[in-house]
Image: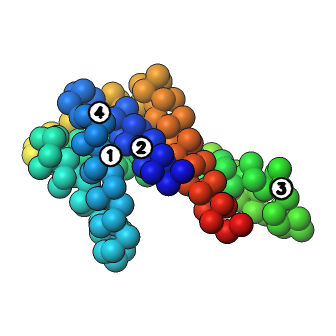
Amino acid sequence: FYIVSYWLRAKRWQVFDIHDQMSLPNLFAITSIHTLVNNILPARTGELAYPYFQKKIQNVSVHQSLTSIVIVRMLDLAVIALLFSGAQVIFNIFPLQSEFKLLAFGIFVGVILALIFLRKAIRLFSRVFIKLPKIQLLLIDTDKMIAEMQERDRFIRAAVWSLLAWLCKFVNFYLLLL
C-alpha cells in the first residue's frame, strides 16, 4: 500500500502539470526523493527538493513547482480534515468531544475557502507591488498558473488522487498497527 500511495501522489502531481511535460515514472522518483528529503531535513525544508528535482529531471520551472506545492499542500490539508471528520463520525473516536468534529470540518471548509480566494489575494498583492514590476509580473504569472490548476476538472481529479493516496497511506498505517 505504501508504494501505491506514492504512485497515487505522483499521479496527483501529474494532474497539476499545466504544460503536460511530466512523465509518471519521473514524478514517482521525484515524489519518493522529495518525501525522503522532507523527512530528513527539519521544518519541512525538504519541500524545496521538489522544485529542485523537477527542474533538474523534467525541466519544469521552479515557479510552477512552488505554485503546485502550495495548491497540493492546501488540498492535502482539506483531504486529511475530511478523512478525520469522516472517521470521527463513523467510528466516534472522541465520543465526548464533538469539538474535534467541528474543528476538522472547520479546517476543511477553511482550506476550501482559502483555495477559492487565493487568486483574489494574489491579484490584490500584484496591485500593491505595482512599483516593483518584477514582483508584480511574478504574481500575475502565479495567478495564471493557479487559474489553470484550479480548473474544475483538473482540481477534482487532483482531489480524488489525493484522497486515494491518503486512504492508502492510512490503510498501510492501520495494517502496521494490527
Alpha carbon of mark 1 to alpha carbon of mark 3: how far? 33 Å
Apparent side of residue 89 relative to residue 79 in the rendered image (left or right): right
Q: In which image quadrant can residue 122 be found?
A: top left
- Disc 1 vs disc 4: which is toward the camera? 1
Task: Give the crowd class for mark 4: few <14, some 14-19, many >=20 residues within 10 Å.
Answer: some
For label 3, the residue is 91
Residue on which the image places disc 1: 28
In the image, residue 117 sits, relative to residue 135, either above or below, namely above
Which residue matches tag 4? Answer: 17
- Residue shown at 46% from the left, 35% from the top: 158
Q: What amino acid type is highlighted by mark number 3?
A: Phe
- Residue ID at (45%, 41%): 8
Q: How crowded is mark 2: few (under 14 residues within 10 Å), some or many (20 or more)?
A: many
Q: Distance between the residues labelled 4 and 3?
A: 37 Å
**In the image, what residue type sits under mark 1?**
Phe
| N-term mark: 1 or 4 | 4
Q: Position of residue 85 (x, y in %)?
A: 72, 52
Which secondary structure, mark 3?
helix
Q: Which of 140 and 54 is in front in this view?
A: 54
Q: As rendered, which of 143 and 30 lies closer to the eye?
A: 30
Left of 63 or right of it: where is 28?
A: right
